[in-house]
């Protein structure tokens, strides 16, 4: 890819999806401290993954209403922060997106691309292959088949993770599917350690070159109250209850005095909070990691407010917020107060033996900017979804 390739336009003269997202990715690589050669290499991977859709002009609607983002762009970014050093940059994409919204075709196309990527980078897909019949049945159900995240590193070879849909064989069988997947991967007692949940949006696998490859189970918690968040953690030892409750309060804009009114617990009525429970070694009963994912975009009036909360949380953990501010400018030229959803989620991750991480998920907004919300953030009601 050349710099000129980032200026691609369709036959109508409108910018293309590939040009927009590749340009965003190159600029985000700079924010994350990656060199220009790596940035162009990763942008090329992104365009190849989009296939023919990369050349689709943005004045045409999305190929289909992908679950990955609010405006149905098949690409999302995240920056994961630690107290020292540049944030880790990840790009999340839907490898089967060019095949459209039929999940059987989408899933098979995604699997082919994942195996092509794995062969290119000498990454084993054995854990994914072990679960293929569970997550890619002949007539899959649910809003997605396969998502892929690439954690971008110097040298042009990313770390790879895949996200699978536990509802592929039916929503009512999600818990059964997760339990069977964990059993096949050697985590025979893992499912018994999970807290109660209202849904199972993802099961994720680390593939290839990870220090401690994880299996991660994502759970959905409808109408959660901030003070209920600590009870969802099954790490032992894990983060303190006050830390988890305060993270939810800060990310959603709930102050300490608003948690209870007349003895009634204040519950989050927008998109639900997600938790992630990660398992590494197969000799333990419980998870070695726990993450809270808060959909900040449903509890902030606009992105300036969401950004302020992110800055507060990063400062609380001794992390430099400057890269996140730069990341917003790398993705969009609009004013933060003119929309909501550029920052989609804020997440707090704990893993045994590692310092806490704060992650911000950044939307590409290729097709649409969600207008600012006029209601009080904690009372916004939506249809749910990712």
Image: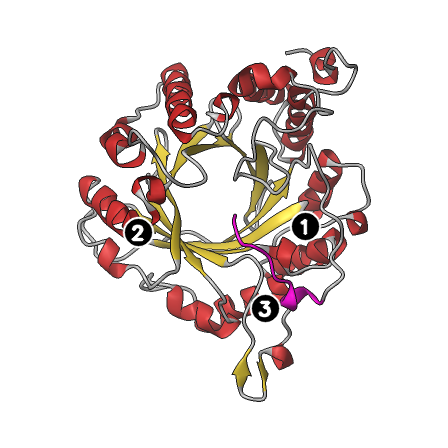
- Whole-percent x and y of residue 324? 67, 45
Residue 345 lies in the magenta-colored region: no
Disc 2 or 1, which lies upstream in sequence? 2
> Taking the image as drawn, is residue 281 in sight?
no
List the residue tagged with mark 2: 172
Real-space CA distance between mark 3 and mark 2, rounded to the nearest whole angstrom: 32 Å
Q: Main secondary structure of the magenta part?
A: loop
- Whole-percent x and y of residue 272? 51, 59
287 sits left or right of 23 in the view = left
> What's the magenta region?
376-386
Q: Characterize the local packing of mark 1: few (<14), some (14-19) or many (20 or more) Cα atoms within 10 angstroms.
A: some
**Which of 200/167 is in front?**
167
Give the number of the mark in front: 1 or 3.
Answer: 3
The residue lying at 41 percent from left, 33 percent from top is 146
* 86 relative to 317, above or below: above
Real-space CA distance between mark 2 and mark 1, rounded to the nearest whole angstrom: 41 Å
Q: Characterize the local packing of mark 3: few (<14), some (14-19) or many (20 or more) Cα atoms within 10 angstroms.
A: many
Residue 384 lies in the magenta-colored region: yes
Residue contact between numbered discs 3 and 2, judged by CB atoms under 8 Å: no
Real-space CA distance between mark 1 and mark 3, rounded to the nearest whole angstrom: 19 Å
- Whole-percent x and y of residue 71? 64, 39
> Taking the image as drawn, is residue 217 in sight?
yes
List the residue tagged with mark 3: 249
List the residue tagged with mark 1: 321
165 sits left or right of 361 in the view = left
Q: Secondary structure at mark 3?
A: helix
Give the number of the mark in front: 2 or 1.
Answer: 2
Residue contact between numbered discs 1 and 3, judged by CB atoms under 8 Å: no
8 sits left or right of 232 in the view = right
The outermost residue toward the bottom is 262
Q: Characterize the local packing of mark 2: few (<14), some (14-19) or many (20 or more) Cα atoms within 10 angstroms.
A: few
């Amino acid at each position: 890819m050349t710099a000129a390739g980032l200026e691609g336009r369709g036959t109508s003269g409108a910018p293309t999806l590939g040009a927009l997202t590749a340009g965003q990715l190159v600029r985000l690589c700079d924010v994350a401290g990656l060199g220009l050669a790596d940035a162009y290499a990763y942008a090329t991977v992104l365009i190849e993954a989009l296939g023919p859709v990369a050349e689709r002009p943005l004045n045409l609607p999305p190929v289909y209403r992908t679950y990955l983002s609010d405006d149905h762009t098949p690409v999302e970014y995240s920056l994961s922060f630690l107290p020292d050093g540049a944030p880790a940059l990840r790009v999340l994409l839907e490898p089967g997106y060019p095949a459209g919204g039929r999940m059987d075709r989408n899933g098979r196309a995604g699997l082919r691309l994942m195996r092509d990527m794995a062969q290119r980078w000498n990454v084993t897909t054995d854990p994914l292959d072990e679960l293929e019949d569970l997550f890619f049945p002949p007539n899959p159900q649910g809003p997605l088949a396969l998502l892929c995240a690439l954690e971008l590193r110097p040298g042009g070879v990313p770390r790879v993770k895949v996200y699978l849909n536990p509802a592929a064989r039916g929503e009512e069988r999600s818990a059964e599917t997760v339990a069977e997947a964990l059993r096949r991967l050697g985590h025979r007692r893992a499912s018994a350690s999970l807290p109660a949940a209202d849904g199972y949006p993802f099961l994720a696998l680390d593939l290839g070159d990870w220090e401690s490859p994880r299996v991660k189970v994502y759970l959905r918690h409808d109408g959660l109250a901030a003070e209920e968040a600590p009870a969802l953690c099954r790490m032992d030892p894990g983060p303190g209850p006050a830390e988890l409750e305060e993270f939810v309060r800060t990310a959603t804009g709930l102050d300490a005095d608003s948690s209870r009114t007349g003895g009634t617990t204040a519950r989050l009525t927008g998109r639900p909070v997600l938790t992630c429970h990660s398992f590494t070694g197969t000799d333990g009963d419980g998870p070695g990691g726990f993450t809270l994912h808060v959909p900040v975009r449903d509890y902030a009036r606009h992105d300036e407010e969401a950004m302020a909360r992110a800055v507060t949380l990063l400062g609380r953990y001794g992390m430099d917020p400057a890269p996140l501010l730069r990341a917003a400018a790398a993705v969009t030229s609009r004013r933060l107060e003119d929309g909501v959803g550029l920052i989609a989620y804020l997440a707090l991750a704990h893993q045994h033996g590692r310092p806490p991480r704060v992650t911000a998920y950044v939307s590409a907004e290729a097709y649409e900017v969600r207008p600012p919300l006029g209601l009080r953030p904690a009372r916004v009601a939506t249809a749910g979804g990712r």
